[in-house]
Image: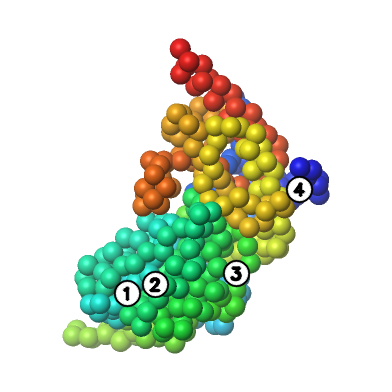
Amino acid sequence: MTFTQAKPLAMLTRQDFPILHQSIHGKPLVYLDNAATSQKPLAVLQALQYYYEHDNANVHRGAHTLSSRATDAYEGARDKVAAFVNARSRQEIVYTRNASEAINLVAYAWGMNTLQAGDEIILSVMEHHSNLVPWQFVAQRTGAVLKFVELTATQEFDFEQFKSLLSPQTKLVSVVHVSNTLGCINPVKEICAEAHKVGARVLIDACQSAPHMTLDVQEIDCDWLVASGHKMCAPTGIGFLYGKLDLLREMPPFLGGGEMIADVFLDHSTYADLPHKFEAGTPAIAEAIALGAAVDYLTNLGMDKIHAYEEELTAYLFAQLAQIPAVQIYGPQPNADGSGRAALAAFTTGEVHPHDLSTLLDQSGVAIRSGHHCTQPLHRHLNVASTARTSLYFYNTREDIDIFIASLKETLDFFGNIFAE
């Protein structure tokens, strides 16, 4: 296979990421754990520093200059997120600590108050624990029934089985957009269309898609969508929930306290309008502002350009991994041009445990993930205890992949000699 050498997006961006320019165990860092968390560009780091050096004050509650500037930056970031996912209104964007909290917000504010015994919740076997456990809580409390979409022969979302699970009792479908283990890109627009035919609501976990491709919640027509900032160049401790405006208005508050109130009396309270109804207490102000800076950074690069470059990297990664007989990759194969799946590969290597593999690769400066990737039910479904995972982002290069492949071969040779003794 021949790979075209367009000017790599990484060459235009690597200088923006200070953390990438260091040595690990005397070797240049090759960071290939982006599905777990992305690195942060200078623009994001500077946004954090600027807030604390110039504008540090609580938002919405002060008439002084610092509070006004902090509020403008905090709410300005909300506008950026709304535009990033093409929400109809800025009021449809609720700040949360992460996607897990966003899912829990929907589970408690909507699920606990809406679902009844016999109602059905459709999930899939590939879901992250954060999109399983909250719905288990809801089912236990309400008597709702959990149903699960399984995999096709190519280890993708079984859309035909999904349609067969839908019924008048289906009240919620909650599925991942891109699997953090299989790398498959699920047909979320079609999933929403089919679910809405039976009157069900749909939540999309976009943690692995928001950093890598254009998102349009109006086109997808989901009822809710969640994402975590730390996977899309923003700091930890900030994420967001998108929800359709009318639906968010119907949902009661998730947490009580300051900021989410209109008026408080000793025996009752009234609540603020959206989105503040769901944002109790002092928020992660600096992190939200930095999320806005991350959205600016990604938008200026161009999500289409990021996605196209990652497809090229995906094709190259899979071509190199195919040369190692011991490697078994989970999820669908990419198309020849790298399209059709995410820029990650979860794999096993015969007798070599993924944790041992990851530990030895670290000695070569190569950072990958090992374990169950918060998808234990999926790993059981695949009949494998754990996998190693390499995951790419736009600041990675083919040279990163070459170093990873060389280190992987060297590590497997090392273990092969041990097993032969």
* Label 2 CA crowd tier, 10 Å (few <14, some 14–19, many 20+): some
**Amino acid type for the residue under numbered disc 4:** Pro
Would you place residue 13 above or below residue 107 in this image?
above
Sequence-first disc among 2 and 1: 1
Which quadrant would residue 90 be assigned to in this image? bottom right
Closer mark to the observer between disc 2 and disc 4: 2
Instruction: Determine contact: label 3, label 4, CB under 8 Å.
Output: no
Closer mark to the observer between disc 2 and disc 3: 2
Label 3: element kind: loop
Q: According to the image, label 3 marks what residue?
A: 215
Label 1: element kind: strand
Closer mark to the observer between disc 3 and disc 1: 1
Residue 120's label in the rendered image is 1
Instruction: Determine contact: label 2, label 1, CB under 8 Å.
Output: yes
Report how far apart the C-alphas of labels 2 and 3 lie in the structure: 27 Å
- Residue 92, given in percent of the width and then of the height, sits at 49, 79
Residue 165's label in the rendered image is 2
Sequence-first disc among 3 and 1: 1
* Label 3 CA crowd tier, 10 Å (few <14, some 14–19, many 20+): some
Left or right of residue 345: residue 399: right
Left or right of residue 156: residue 381: left
